Amino acid sequence: MTAVGDRAIKWVQCYLDDVWPDLVREPDGGTILLTHLFEAFTPNRFPQMIREYAKENDFIIVTKDKDFLEQSSLMGHPPKIIHLRLGNCLVQEIVDLLADQSGQIKAFDKQMSRSYMLLP
């Protein structure tokens, strides 16, 4: 398992170093990425895309980031959110926690009225 954030950061840094300098034309509005609809890829766009994908595919978002909780409070559910309060940890610790809590997670998934679960 690779954290999406780590891969995304490496990709953006490579893009900025190797591609962006050849593409910049004045005036530069500061937008470095565009969505498939050629809209500016703002800092909030990535969580929105994850949320939309999870909703369309009936996935539960498992995150350590409270931004998804805030979005869920504003927009409701689906998708459901599992918020991990682990701090800095190894990916294996997350895998172990989810495996240990699999029964509770399955029950949470079946409860239509609940949209948020806090672990541990």
Image (cartoon, grey):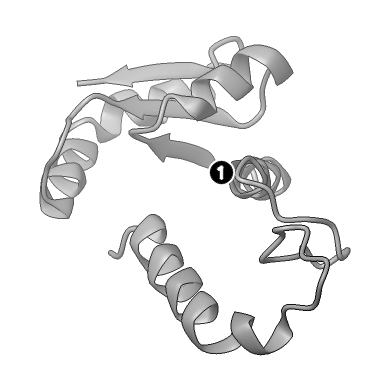
| Residue pictured at 11% horizontal, 50% vertical | 90
Nearest the viewer among 33 and 64 is 33
Placement of the C terminus among the 4 image quadrants = top left
Nearest the viewer among 105 and 21 is 21
| Residue pictured at 66% horizontal, 28% vertical | 78
The location of residue 29, given as percent across then percent down, is 78, 58
| Residue pictured at 39% horizontal, 18% vertical | 117
| Residue pictured at 19% horizontal, 43% vertical | 94
The location of residue 106, given as percent across then percent down, is 39, 31
Q: Is residue 107 above or below residue 12?
A: above
Instruction: Please rate how many residues cluster around mark 1, counting C-alpha atoms within 10 Å: few if below 14, some from 14 to 19, many from 20.
Output: some
The location of residue 44, given as percent across then percent down, is 63, 40
Disc 1 on helix, strand or loop? Answer: loop
The location of residue 60, given as percent across then percent down, is 51, 37
> On the rendered structure, is 10 left or right of 38?
left
Q: Which residue is mark 1?
A: 59
The kind of residue on which mark 1 rests is Phe
> On the rendered structure, is 18 left or right of 71?
left
Residue at the right extreme, as displayed: 37
> On the rendered structure, is 107 left or right of 104?
right
Placement of the N terminus among the 4 image quadrants = bottom left
